Amino acid sequence: MADGYNKPIPIPQPESDNYWEGAKAGELRLRKCDDCDQAYFYPRNICPDCGNNNTSWIVASGNAKIHTFAIVHRAPHPGFVDDIPYVPAIVELEEGPRMATQIVNVEADPSKISIDMAVKVVFESITDEISLPKFEPA
Amino acid sequence: MRRKTRQTYSGEDLKMPVMDKLKAISGSAAIVGVAESDNIGRVPEKGPMELHAEAGRNALADAGIDKSEVDGVFTAGYSTYDIAEYMGITPHFTDSTSVGGSSFVIHIAHAMAAIQAGYCEVALITHGESGRSNRARAAGNPGLAGAQYEQPYGIMGAPIGYSMAANRYMHQYGEDRTREAMANIAISTRKWANMNEKAYFYDTPMTFDEYHDSRWVSWPFHLPDCCLVTDAGAAIVITSTERAKSTRKGGVRVLGAAEGHDHSVLHQMPDLTRTWGRHTGPQALEMAGITHDELDLAMIYDSFTYTVIATLESLGFCGPGEGPDFVADQRTAPGGDFPLNTSGGGLSYTHPGMYGIFTVVEAVRQLRGETGKRQLDKCNLAMAHGTGGTLSSTGTVILARD
């Protein structure tokens, strides 16, 4: 854990332990409903589409495209003061679901980032237990 | 047919509740009292509970109804037992439905249903928040999706989520025309606020140049794209239309009411350009038996300029992507042919956090003819619409002056 990390840190829940363990191991793990044959986000045992729990875990490719983003100029929390401007985003994973994230390793300038731009996952270790999946230009 | 994925809804059926039953109770309840707290804006000397209680007392005085007659209590952000205890009320009907800023509009539907069913006769809906000055902010539940999957990325607070939705809209429908529409909403709303002595920006006009030159909060939002953060309370008193006749000012009837939501956290929103208003607009209008064209006033929750554009489209005032044309040329400003947010809205009047109740307060005052120099020449039918969460929930009511 980086010293002085003072941003919100996820607290894994029973249904998300495996997701966060995967992220720590460098894998983006998704739930998939075997009845619907479809992946979904965020992780929960019961499929949000059909309501069954005939569900499993898959490892996502990590390839995605930007669905939308913003460029934050006023920090919403003391932990982000040194990060502005930063780029929160929603990405659409190759497997279908969308997830919230940050776009990193890119200039925080609307002329340098575009919706539908191809991105791929990178993992940022923030504590011994938690790594955050973020995305960078592919 | 089951949807293929919960993150798309193209071809979604416009499924409505049991409309025959809803039409049967249309107009059966009436708003008989509305009020703000004694002060709104910057009120550090009072806490949020006091703002609830002041607004509740003022709304009951507006109605000419004694507190002892209140038998239904509705609130959000707190449990009704906290508010009722503070005010010294012991209700027989209690509803703490908390779905953000839409809650208090939704409570109107619940109050009407409860009055119709016989659970209560005098319903009091209260709101109070010290958005600017609160000394005791509550922490969220760390196990929820927002805490695990959004906040660690700095996606917290309304401007960031809404600006992400707005950027998607710009991508789909054009950046320049969306920007111009956002400026039009910011300016027209400010003009209304300049006619409302209670408005935070009553004395502060704004030009298009000032809008475009203002600093970024979260691109694509300038500061004037974002609502105020104030201290304020408001309350509404509702009773049966029959009983309303014997109240101090008479009643403003509730002709239509609808509610719902399709997500909580932003990344679960099926379409960032369409709110649940796509259901509550048509449903409330059908229940009321009127069309968009018959409305004299639209009070649309304006947490952000973009919220208004997406909401007008979702409610059916215009089609997807047509919002920028709909609000062009200051059509929503004083003197325009589509009066919108005549109080000055969340953008320029007040916005303590969950602003929805204030859309109803202004609609009732316009219908009663109490709004002074900003009073509309004709106001017999009004829509008030609340949005909650991150474009998550909506509540729509259609109100009529007898």
Image (spheres, helix red, strand yellow):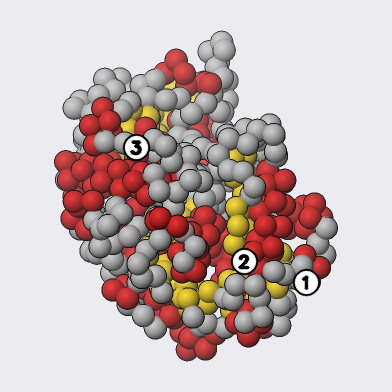
- What residue sits right under mark 1 in the picture? B69
Neighbours of disc 3 within 10 Å: few (<14), some (14-19), many (20+) = some
Residue B283 x/y as whole percent: 41, 75
> What chain letter is assigned to the residue under label 2?
B
- What residue sits right under mark 2 in the picture? B33
Distance in Å between CA atoms under marks 2 and 1: 13 Å
Q: Is residue B398 above or below residue A114?
A: below
* Of pointers 3 and 1, the one earlier in the residue sequence: 1
What secondary structure is found at the residue carrying circle 3?
loop
Residue drawn at point x = 47 percent, y = 18 percent: A81
Q: As shown in the figure, which amino acid type bears the numbered disc 1?
A: Glu
Q: Viewer-proximal residue, B151 or B110?
A: B110
> Mark 1 and mark 3 in contact (Cβ < 8 Å)?
no
- Figure quadrant of residue B138: top right
Residue depth check, mark 3 versus mark 1: number of the one nearer the observer = 3
Label drawn at residue B42: none
Q: Is residue A117 left or right of residue B1?
A: left
* Of pointers 2 and 1, the one earlier in the residue sequence: 2
Distance in Å between CA atoms under marks 2 and 3: 31 Å
Q: Is residue B37 above or below residue B156?
A: below
> Mark 1 and mark 2 in contact (Cβ < 8 Å)?
no
Q: As shown in the figure, which amino acid type bears the numbered disc 3?
A: Pro
What secondary structure is found at the residue carrying circle 2?
strand
- What residue sits right under mark 3 in the picture? B205
User: Where does the N terminus of chain A fall, quadrant-wise?
Assistant: top right
